[in-house]
């Protein structure tokens, strides 16, 4: 069976003082049923790895597609590994929007990350306009085909469904809408990669997951956990979400 996952994306938030949240998280969840992942800003990865209890994996929020070179300000997958990361989030809608990343950029980055030995959390999600014009599954299908490289396995691939309009807004799709997209992604995984990979890769939901809506979302079919932004910054909030997942 798939091990559930609670992943926190700190985005561009947090300085060394925020590491105390990681310590609190480790103490509250010394033996979690689900896998725990925190993706702090790159500046904190090494300190986070040194601070966090071993049951908390640490990840990056992006990487470059090249292993090294003249790319000022960028970070390679090998550098993330060297800093202490075991995962990287790729194709987050904020990267796609702020940095004009398209599916092929995300796929190349994912390939580089897998080559470096990282596991990848690849984000897919529709805009409000796409949702309202009934194009959600087409958009997700296109992003799925274009963003996920061929060489993934059931262990190193995590897909995150993150409707753009639900991120940081407090708006959440209906449970039926979440289930429809997760079932669709599961079917695409099985069709493209076969039953082995297709059934073992995890699919997370992301977008305004909070302590008060987590349990309902985790009861939806093919929801294997959550990618959490705002509520992952405070250990008590993230902890409540982890408890809901451990009970699901
Ligand atoms: P949010 O962010 O939980 O703050 O909505 C989710 C995400 O962007 O991963």
Image (cartoon, helix red, strand yellow):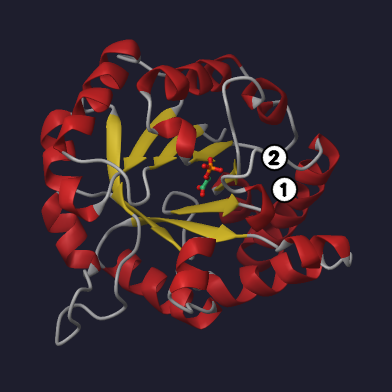
The numbered mark, 1 or 2, whose residue comes first in the sequence reads: 1
The residue positioned 55% from the left and 36% from the top of the image is 2
Quadrant for the N terminus, please. top right
Q: In the rendering, which numbered label is found on residue 213?
A: none
Asked which quadrant contains residue 99, the reply is bottom left
Near-viewer residue (56 or 166): 166
Which structural element holds mark 2?
loop
In this view of the protein, can residue 123 be seen by the observer?
A: yes
Q: Which mark is residue 222?
A: 2
The residue positioned 83% from the left and 68% from the top of the image is: 135
Quadrant location of the C terminus?
top right
Q: Residue furthest bottom?
A: 70
Q: Percent position (x, y) of residue 41?
A: 26, 50
Query: What's the distance in space between the residues labelled 1 and 2, CA to CA?
Result: 6 Å
The residue at the point 31 percent across, 78 percent down is 65
- Report x, y in % for residue 217: 69, 30
* Left or right of residue 63, residue 219 in this image: right
Please determine whether, in this image, residue 178 is positioned above or below residue 108: above
Proximity of marks 1 and 2: CB atoms separated by less than 8 Å? yes
Q: Please tell me how crowded label 2 is: few (under 14), some (14-19), or many (20+) other residues with Cα within 10 Å.
A: many
Using residue 68 as the reference point, say whether residue 65 is left or right of it: right
Residue 26: x %, y % from top left: 27, 19
Q: Can you tell which mark lies on residue 182?
A: 1
Residue 188 point in image, percent of width and height = 71, 62
Residue 33 visible to an observer of this rendering: no
Mark 1: few/some/many CA within 10 Å (<14, 14-19, 20+): many
Residue at image location 20% in from the left, 77% down from the top: 67
């Amino acid at each position: 069976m798939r091990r559930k996952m609670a992943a926190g994306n700190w985005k561009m938030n947090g300085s060394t003082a925020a590491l105390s949240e990681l310590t609190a998280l480790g103490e509250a969840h010394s033996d979690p049923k689900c896998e725990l992942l925190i993706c702090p800003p790159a500046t904190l990865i090494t300190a986070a790895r040194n601070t966090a209890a071993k049951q908390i994996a640490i990840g990056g929020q992006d990487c470059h597609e090249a292993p090294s070179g003249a790319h000022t300000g960028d970070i390679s997958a090998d550098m993330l590994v060297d800093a202490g990361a075991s995962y990287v989030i790729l194709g987050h809608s904020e990267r796609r929007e702020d940095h004009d990343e398209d599916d092929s950029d995300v796929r190349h980055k994912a390939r580089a990350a897998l080559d470096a030995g990282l596991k990848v959390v690849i984000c897919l999600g529709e805009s409000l306009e796409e949702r309202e014009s009934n194009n959600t599954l087409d958009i997700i299908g296109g992003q799925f085909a274009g963003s996920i490289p061929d060489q993934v396995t059931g262990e190193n691939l995590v897909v995150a469904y993150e409707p753009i309009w639900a991120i940081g807004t407090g708006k959440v799709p209906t449970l039926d809408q979440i289930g429809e997209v997760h079932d669709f992604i599961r079917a695409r995984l099985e069709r493209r990669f076969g039953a082995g990979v297709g059934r073992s890769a995890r699919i997370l939901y992301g977008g305004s997951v909070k302590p008060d809506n987590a349990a309902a979302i985790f009861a939806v079919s093919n929801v294997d956990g959550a990618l959490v932004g705002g509520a992952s910054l405070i250990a008590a909030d993230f902890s409540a979400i982890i408890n809901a997942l451990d009970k699901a």
